[in-house]
Amino acid sequence: MKAVVLAAGQGTRMRPLSESVPKPMLPVADRPLAAHTVDAAVDAGAEEIVLVIGYEAKAVRGYFGDVYRGTPVSYAVQEEQAGTADAVNAARDFLEGSFAVLNGDNLYDPAAIDRLFDACPAICAIEVDEPSNYGVLSTDMGTDGRVTEIVEKPNDPPTNLANAGAYAFPAEAREWLEVPESERGEREITDVVTQVIDEYTVTPVALERWLDVGRPWELLEANEWKLGELDRRIDGEVSGDARLEGGVVVEPGATVRSGVVIEGPALIREGATVGPNAYVRGATVIGPDAEIGHAVEIKNSVVSRGTSVSHLSYVGDSVLGRNVNLGAGTTVANLRHDDDDIKFTVKGDRIPTGRRKLGVITGDEVKTGINSSLTPGLKLGPGSTTRPGETVGRDR
């Protein structure tokens, strides 16, 4: 079975992180987000990976190449973002026989992808608390029966089984990809699913765990999940008086200096430098060539490639883009005084994140002046700056 992995979208809800990096290539533990999906497909026995690309396609091609983990990789270009069925249709010329479709910005329980391939025609489903926010599956016998219908965000959901955006299609579905536009003005893969349900017995494949990584704080959740799966490994240079506890990975070429304390799960990527006397805790990634200075504390955060957090700074529950420079004494606040959930701006609207703690989300090349204070749920766009001693309470 070939696996089509959708990785063409701009990820506008993920801004500012996706301003220059395609959402599927954002870091989740030791690899890009899309690589977790591709790995699941390879482990399930995919004979070929077909990546559908568009926005910032060069980054996707550069990472996966022509062969990934011994599996051939092809690329189909989606010229305009016209919906998921349109994306799969862009890969049409690569398809013969049954094929799988996976979202490159979703994290799946890998074992379920193996079961999905075996059960073709099939669709992955997961039980959720608020099914009206999702496409919902109806079945004739719960997760043990067959799928009888798929309804998008119904007001009165027939079940609590959400469509998890992973499909195994019969060969004939290749001819059903040219669907009309929906009310949203997009060509939806669920219209293809509906036709497959009408023609075949479609098996629901239950997921133990699933995450749609669509908004910046969900990248934190993705890293919390995948960092927890890493086995402890110390390959870089670690000072004799540094203390590393739990699931810590220090990659070759990374340096952990004197007096540093790291409480896993944490990943220190190649070329990164931590310390002296720094404190890294929670589910934290220190990206390649990043620098964490003297007496800095980093908690439950993603620090991207080439970013520097100078001495005496605190960063909590945050995602820092590439080549960011936080001046000495920069403090990120990540908790409201009223202890309420923190809101974040997505496509112009201030929406609840469902997180009690959330700090700052920055684009690339942000610079803060010394002793800057950044308030909870703050967004700083690429190239933003702050003045020394400034308290920043509004997005930039």
Image (cartoon, rainbow, N blue to C red):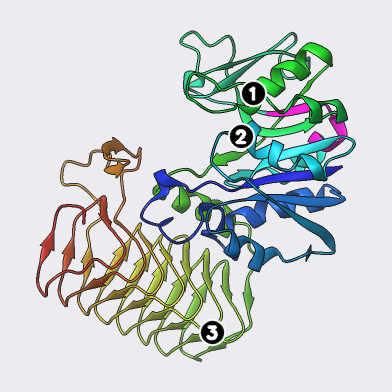
Three-letter residue code for mark 2: Thr
Residue 190 numbered tag: 1
Q: Where is residue 377 in the image (x, y as percent from the top left)?
A: 26, 50
* Residue ranking furthest to the right: 97
Question: Residue 298, percent across and down?
Answer: 36, 68
Residue 245 percent coordinates (x, y): 51, 71
Sequence-wise first label, 3 or 2: 2
Contact (Cβ within 8 Å) of mark 1 with mark 2: yes
Real-space CA distance between mark 1 and mark 2, rounded to the nearest whole angstrom: 9 Å
Asked if residue 120 lies in the magenta stretch, the reply is yes
Name the element at disc 3.
loop
Vertical position of residue 159 compared to residue 71: above or below: above
Q: Is residue 126 visible?
A: no
Query: What residue sits right under mark 2 in the picture?
Result: 84
Q: In which quarter of the image is residue 62?
A: bottom right
| Residue extent of the magenta highlight | 116-124
The quadrant in which residue 229 appears is bottom right
Residue placed under numbered mark 3 in the picture: 254
The local crowd at label 2, few if under 14, some if 14 to 19, many if 20 or more residues have their Cα within 10 Å, is many
